[in-house]
Image (tube, rainbow, N blue to C red):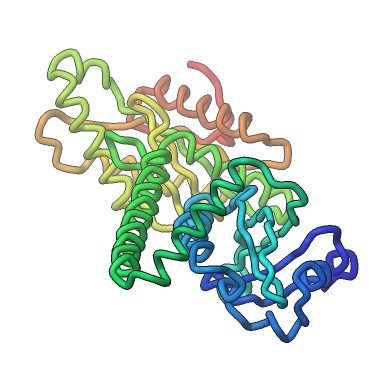
Amino acid sequence: MDERLNHAPCGYVSITNRGIIMAVNETFLNMFGYDRKDVLDHHIESMMSMANKFLFHTYFYPFIQLYGYVNEMYLTLKSKQGDSIPVLVNGRSRRGDEEEIIDCVFIQMSKRIDYEKEIRNAKTKIEEAYRLKDEALGRLEVLHRDIELKQAELIRLNAELETLAVTDALTGLKNRRYFIEKLDAYMERFAASHMLFSVLILDVDHFKKINDTQGHLVGDQVLRKLAQIMEANLEEPALAARYGGEEFIVLLPGMDARQSKQAAEDLRTAIEQDSWEECAVTVSIGAATVTSEDTNISILARADQALYQSKNNGRNCVTHAADGLHHK
């Protein structure tokens, strides 16, 4: 452990996601009167009363799993001499070599305030209930299991919300926000390693006419099917996303201008030759390959200009920004 961390003005403990203490600084040991051997490889809850264990399970673990951190949680820990020492705990999770690690900082409280007294009184009553009534213990265990189930449900719902935040509701493809984040990452990778990538922008030809003559429900069906065709004809690590309206965008990692133009042509052909029940559907495609002069904005602008040229050339075709754009 770094010497400055070892003698920091606050206690530091590193635990696994199961609560086993992996590292501790000298300040923490002095604060509670323990030797290093007394705490290493022991469970953090071995220093807690039953009430504190309950509070730790119902607040600390769920908050860490949902948000990755806990700020200013009030606890009392037992010293080696058995004294209860009030502390504020800050925790943050990180990925270790083999499992998730939670780094915790402990700051000893020097003053008591009213709500702390209320908490201590509540803890005393809970401890008394645990000692005197097995039935109360059983009810608390049932409550604990119920909280764990609700915690798992919260984590599941949070994962669903994260998915919805980056997914286009109509087509099921990734949305523009997600695509821009990935584009930024590939721009950084290109700056560091010159790993090529290309971008395609697709636009459904005469889409307004489809909406006007066949209705918006048919238009939505066209967009959904187009998304399915794109996913079926693009291999990882290619990424397809809905850019907005009838426009779609594709990221093609590792592809140069020739490869990206061929991939775009294959995609255009697959869309044109698919069986469209409502009406014939074609797309115009603009492509651009990253250069050392590009930014995330300029590469999209060059692909968009190439798309404009494809439409200008009669639609249902592919134009790469490197082809030498010119207006008819």
- The answer to whether 195 appears left or right of 160 in the picture is right
Q: Residue 273 in the image: state x and y as whole percent.
A: 21, 42
241 lies above or below 122 = above
- The answer to whether 96 appears left or right of 208 in the picture is right
Q: Nearer the viewer, residue 163 or 53?
A: 53
Q: Residue furthest left?
A: 277
Label count reads 0
Q: Nearer the viewer, residue 21 or 204?
A: 21
203 lies above or below 148 = above
Q: Residue 85 in the image: state x and y as whole percent.
A: 69, 62
Residue drawn at the location 82% of the way across and 73% of the way down: 1
319 lies above or below 212 = below
Q: Residue 318 in the image: state x and y as whole percent.
A: 42, 35
The quadrant in which residue 250 appears is top left
The quadrant in which residue 204 appears is top left
Residue drawn at the location 35% of the way across and 23% of the way down: 314
Residue drawn at the location 78% of the way across and 73% of the way down: 29
- The answer to whether 203 appears left or right of 178 in the picture is left
163 lies above or below 83 = above
The quadrant in which residue 169 appears is top left
- The answer to whether 165 appears left or right of 275 in the picture is right
Q: Residue furthest bottom?
A: 37
Q: Nearer the viewer, residue 287 or 210?
A: 210
